[in-house]
Amino acid sequence: MSNHIYFFDTTLRDGEQSPGVNLNMQEKLEIARQLERLGVDVIEAGFPVASQGDFEGVRAIANTIKEPVVTALARAVMADIDRAWEAIQGAQRPRIHTFIATSPIHMEYKLKMKPEEVLDQAISMVKYARNLCPDVEFSAEDATRTDREFLYRVIEDVIEAGATVVNIPDTVGYCIPEEFGSLIADIRENVPNIDKATISVHCHNDLGLAVANSLAAIESGATQVECTINGIGERAGNAALEEIVMAIKTRRDYLSYTTNINTEAIYRTSMLVSNLTAMYLQPNKAIVGSNAFAHESGIHQHGVLSHRETYEIMTPESIGLKQSHMVLGKHSGRHAFEERLRELGYTSLEQKEIGEAFKKFKDLADKKKHVLDKDIEALINQRAIQIPETYELLYFHISSGNTLLSTSTVKLRSGEGEVEEAACGSGPIDATFKAISRAADLEVELEDYSLRAITSGADALGESTVRVRKNGNTFTGRGISTDVIEASAKAYVNAINKMLYEINS
Ligand code: KIV
Ligand code: ZN
């Protein structure tokens, strides 16, 4: 039995199916490049038949990524498989991932097909996909609620038809670890040709057991795990990649497996995904939450200071979280700034990008005495995705108070022209958003708005996230500033720019 575990990352497919997440092509590419740096073995780049945007995102990733396998999802129907293949055929290592549900409840109510029809469809579509691509993964959706004998038969027949990987999804996050481990062991025992394919697992987190189930499956012989960064995904999400990897690394005495993951890239990958998806982490999130390495109680602090391992089973450095004793401020030069970027793991930035980030850093240092690592990360993440700025916020002016109607005046630049508008609202932010919509002559529905402090203190950087909806599509914008109204206004303008960019491209 192999002791090497392959990581199949589905942040850009199952993760992107999280409610409210909508990544544009550049954002997807940025995440895919970071996943490659992280060392994942497979990137599931999307579901090409779902939309033109998905198709183009997958194709761009397939044409860019060098090392990992790039796969795309397809239902077990020809049109989906053709579209998936069209999107990934330029990849160095393409894989078609096709699926059909095998549980009685899905077959009867969703597919309205008899088990024999599902089996035939699975076999014929795996054969079809294999004629296009040498690497084909088959998933038996809702495998954990599938009749055992039927599941064994489906797996055996799709392997016979050419599947190179068979995936056993716990689609609804229903299994208990011991039970899931036994299922994998039973599949190995009862499917005669199982050694001709890789066994993969794909666990959802509805009962909070996705990581435990994935580890149980590994111990029973699964050698590929499907997961997402920060555990994002449908409903309660998928198994979190960083948790599985760090469990294997930290408990190698018990789990003696190897992986290709460069754990020092975990923190940066997690921050990038959290920022671009606007799915922020709970502070106590394992491995990457802001409290994951914080020690509050006196007893714990004393213990850690005396001997780190009293309360720390892994180091922050092992996930790429470097604690700096160097505080940057307005006297810091470009050299110190670049050095800090390097320490924070931003090693692949171009000089032009560093120059732009340095300028923003200097502007911030004028307003904020100490520029902390979190501030620098926010500046860099802000730059991560450059989209054409149809509108640029030139200034805003508000008048607000608890006894008067809030009003806001904004001036936007658009191309060569400038436009100024004013509006009233139920508060300064509402008034500012209305004034911006008026200046841009656009009506959008504000779906979500949030504001958070990136660091602590009165001069902390605030980050605002705004989600707007237009014609059924959502667009998420972000803005940062030490002034919360400015951060919000920038986020709103950013969301509008993203919307216009997608509509016009
Ligand atoms: O959860 C699931 O079953 C899936 C499959 C398509 C692999 O996402
Ligand atoms: Zn899934």
Image (cartoon, rainbow, N blue to C red):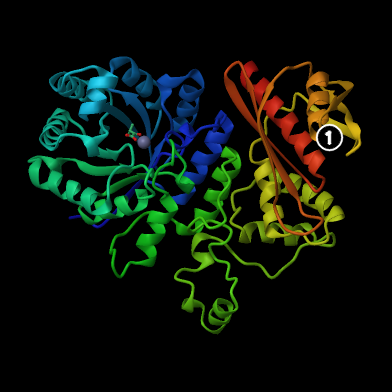
In this rendering, the answer to whether 297 lies above or below 449 is below
* Residue 23 image point, x, y percent: 55, 32
Quarter of the image with the N terminus in it: bottom left
- Quarter where residue 466 is shown: top right
At x 81% / y 61%, what residue is drawn?
329
381 sits left or right of 253 in the view: right
Ligand 2 image position (quadrant): top left
* Residue 27 image point, x, y percent: 57, 35
Mark yes or no: residue 166 visible: no
Quarter of the image with the C terminus in it: top right
Residue at far bottom of view: 306
Asked if disc 1 is less than 8 Å from ligand 2, the answer is no
In this rendering, the answer to whether 280 lies above or below 370 is above
* Residue 216 image point, x, y percent: 26, 54
10 sits left or right of 410 in the view: left
Residue type highlighted by circle 1: Pro
* Residue 323 image point, x, y percent: 62, 67
Q: Which of the pair 160/306 is nearer the observer? A: 306
Q: Which of the pair 89/81 is nearer the observer? A: 81
In this rendering, the answer to whether 240 lies above or below 496 is below
Residue at far front of view: 403
According to the image, label 1 marks what residue?
Answer: 428
- Quarter where residue 413 is shown: top right
In this rendering, the answer to whether 54 lies above or below 484 is above
At x 83% / y 24%, what residue is drawn?
435
At x 64% / y 36%, what residue is drawn?
385
Mark yes or no: residue 234 visible: yes
At x 74% / y 47%, what residue is drawn?
462
